[in-house]
Image (cartoon, rainbow, N blue to C red):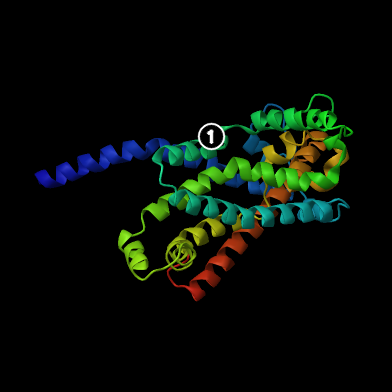
Amino acid sequence: MKKRIKNNKINIELTFLCLPTIIWYVAFCYLPIFGVVLAFKRYQLVPGKNFFYSLFYGSEWVGLSNFRFLMLNPQMMRVVRNTLLYNLAFLILGIVVPVTIAVILSYLHSRVIRDLVQICMLLPHFMSWVIVSYFVYAFLSADRGMLNGVFENLGMEAVNFYLKPGIWPFILVLVQLWKTSGYSMLIYYATICAIDSDLFDCAATDGATVGQVIRYVILPQLRFMIVVLMLLNLGHILSTDFGLFYQVTRNAGSILSTTETIDVFVYKALMEQSNYGFSSAASLIQNGIGCILLIVANKMVKIISPEGGVL
């Protein structure tokens, strides 16, 4: 009886401990599910009534009209193309660059240098995109930018980067890697540090070169973590970081042909037209396709390697 009371007390304490997390998930993950209905309605706010009343009783049911309007939009193909190409670049380089840095870091003998590299790599992760956008503008500004200052000192003409759409895919990929690679690098570096040292000792005894150690010891041990992070990113293949594509580009109209993604397009449509159903339809398609891709990719990974999936 005493043991049962003690267990109940522990369970109550643990329940209260996780209560803030439960409330957060209910408020921000489960209640918004009702918003899915917005994709099939022409939302109108009923004066004096709350959101749910306006949604379920005051808004007209339009079926798939919002989806049809989304698909027939002439700019949609360009926006989807930009989104997919950027995400594919982020997916591939987001694995290659952090893994490479983590492997190099594992071979550094100086602890001070290792710690300094980790701090410098992780610092951009904690910066908001607004701050990053000002850094980028300080480099690329047409009149006071650092790069144009260097060009002028070299006798070259100044370049207005915010009028050159062709160069922005490279700039955005570089900025994304600079901001996010540090966090992924720490995950891979921690995985490398957790590898059994006996494997490295055996490789050294067999006379393995550095390249062979990386290929046959480190990369196989990183495979599971690479697959997990790849699958998680694959679920957002149609979603992009709004701050990167809206703040960093300063929403310059002259470069929209190569910088506008689905999230930015939907946001601008919402701000200009106040079409909540259109925005909800786009979000529903994004998340639906992402969920399907995640499940299919996870299934394929499990077929190849039964212990490699995340679901």
- Furthest toward the left, the residue is 2
Q: Does residue 310 appear in the picture of this structure?
A: no
For badge 1, the amino acid type reads Leu
- Furthest toward the bottom, the residue is 303
| Residue 256 at x, y percent in the picture | 84, 43
Q: Quadrant of residue 200?
A: bottom left
Q: Does residue 192 appear in the picture of this structure?
A: yes
The answer to whether 190 is drawn above or below residue 220 in the figure is: above
| Residue 159 at x, y percent in the picture | 86, 35
| Residue 204 at x, y percent in the picture | 36, 65
Element assignment for label 1: helix
Residue 163 versus residue 230: which sits nearer the camera? 163
Image point (46%, 60%), residue name:
222
Q: Report the label total.
A: 1
| Residue 250 at x, y percent in the picture | 77, 33
18 relative position to 1: left or right: right
265 relative position to 1: left or right: right
Q: Which residue is mark 1?
A: 123
Neighbor class of circle 1 (other Cα within 10 Å; few <14, some 14-19, many 20+) is some
Residue 152 versus residue 122: which sits nearer the camera? 152
Residue 106 versus residue 65: which sits nearer the camera? 106
Residue 24 versus residue 109: which sits nearer the camera? 109
Image point (44%, 42%), residue name:
114
Image point (87%, 37%), residue name:
163
144 relative position to 5: left or right: right
266 relative position to 304: left or right: right
